[in-house]
Image: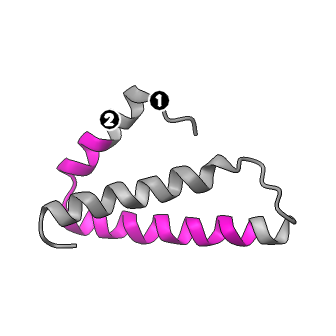
Amino acid sequence: MALNKHTLNEERKRLRTASTEELRAELAAARRELVTLRYQLAQAGGQLENPMRIRHTRKRIARIHTVLRERNEG
């Protein structure tokens, strides 16, 4: 999934309007995805179909943490 400036702004708006429970669920899902991607990377001998997915997932986790911290609930 290519993230351009437009889709990043939409994602930020969506995260800010999401409930805390939704954010926590999305955070858990993103963490699971990151573990899966890292496992696939290890199994594939350093080759992934889309290696940028790891970076995008890490950034998504950071964005969720930021919103939760701003709410003082992270």
Q: Is residue 28 left or right of residue 66?
A: right
Q: Is residue 72 left or right of residue 14?
A: left
Residue topped by disc 2: 10
Residue drawn at the location 60% of the way across and 72% of the way down:
35
Indicate which disc residue 74 carries.
none
Secondary-structure class at tag 1: loop
Give coordinates of residue 51: x percent, y percent. Answer: 70, 50
Q: Residues within 10 Å of mark 2 (few under 14, many from 20)?
A: few
Indicate which disc residue 4 carries.
1
Give coordinates of residue 45: x percent, y percent. Answer: 87, 66
Give coordinates of residue 38: x percent, y percent. Answer: 67, 68
Secondary-structure class at tag 2: helix
Q: Is residue 15 magenta?
A: yes
The picture quadrant where one finds residue 43 is bottom right
Looking at the image, is mark 2 or mark 1 nearer the viewer?
Answer: 1
- The total of numbered circles placed on residues is 2
Q: Is residue 58 left or right of residue 37?
A: left
Residue drawn at the location 41% of the way across and 61% of the way down:
61
Q: Indicate whether 62 appears above or below 39.
A: above
Residue drawn at the location 47% of the way across and 29% of the way down:
4
- The residue lying furthest to the right in this view is 45
Q: Quadrant of the N terminus?
A: top right
Q: Is residue 60 magenta?
A: no
First to last magenta residue range: 12-40
Whichever of labels 2 and 1 marks the residue nearer the N terminus, that label is: 1
Q: Indicate whether 17 appears above or below 5.
A: below
